[in-house]
Amino acid sequence: MKSIKLFLILFIATTVIVSCKKEEPEYDVDKQLAAEEITIKNYVTANNIPALRHDKSGIYYVLTSPGTGVYTYSNLSTTAVTVKYSGKFLSGVQFDGNTEGITFGPPQFPNGLNNLINAWKIAMAPKSVGGILEAGLQKGGRIRIITPSPYAYGPNANGKIPANSILDFDIELIDVKNN
């Protein structure tokens, strides 16, 4: 009899504890993009960012120079890019950057351009594979992108970058090639 009572007490206690656990809200990409659209528009206006274009993805961009060349970006997993860049939050605080030139691609990054956040792929690749620019960013090209969080790190924090962060990048493409 004692073991039945003990079992019932444990069962009830477990049920109460489990039912009290808060459920995490489901991440809704469309809702997140809609909320961030307003924030990005306000940021652009407040900072007088000129010649800004808006892509269907929700990424805002300024193309300073498309660069020169005819690289086709036919296989993003074997595409290596060497870039100089800075990444900052909308507060103006820089969280990352490289002024010497860093290569993202094989062998250090075995999946080439596919290793990068979606915003970078969209900024560099041609329209034929989901990019912003007709022919893609070419060698010597420069672009500034202001990306909603779903095209950066989304609901996941990444090092210094909190979850759901809108990011502002300046990217200069030093070289692009197939590895």
Image (cartoon, rainbow, N blue to C red):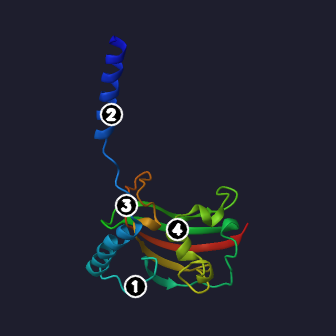
Q: Going by the image, does 78 lie left or right of 162?
A: right
Q: Earlier in the sequence, mark 2 or mark 4?
A: 2
Tell me where residue 73 sits by quadrant.
Answer: bottom right
Q: Which label is found at residue 15?
A: 2
Query: Cα distance, mark 2 to mark 3?
Result: 33 Å
Q: In this orientation, which residue lies closer to the viewer: 128 or 86?
A: 128
Where residue 118 sits in the image (x, y, percent)? 52, 68
Query: Cα distance, mark 2 to mark 1?
Result: 54 Å
The furthest residue to the right: 179
Where residue 20 sits in the image (x, y, percent)? 28, 39
Where residue 177 sits in the image (x, y, percent)? 70, 72
Q: Tell me the amino acid under the disc marked 2.
A: Thr
Determine crowd level at label 2: few under 14, some 14-19, many 20+ residues with C-alpha closer than 10 A.
few
| Element under disc 4 | helix
Q: Which residue is mark 1?
A: 52
Q: Earlier in the sequence, mark 1 or mark 4?
A: 1
The reply to whether discs 1 and 4 touch (Cβ–Cβ < 8 Å) is no
| Residue drawn at (43%, 61%) of the image | 154
Query: Cα distance, mark 3 to mark 4?
Result: 14 Å
Q: Tell me the amino acid under the disc marked 3.
A: Asn
Q: Which residue is mark 4?
A: 118
Q: Going by the image, does 11 lie left or right of 159?
A: left
| Element under disc 3 | loop
Q: Tell me the amino acid under the disc marked 4.
A: Asn
| Element under disc 1 | loop
Query: Cα distance, mark 1 to mark 4?
Result: 19 Å
The count of marks equals 4
Q: Earlier in the sequence, mark 2 or mark 1?
A: 2
Q: Which label is found at residue 164?
A: 3
The reply to whether discs 2 and 4 touch (Cβ–Cβ < 8 Å) is no
Q: Going by the image, does 64 lie left or right of 15?
A: right
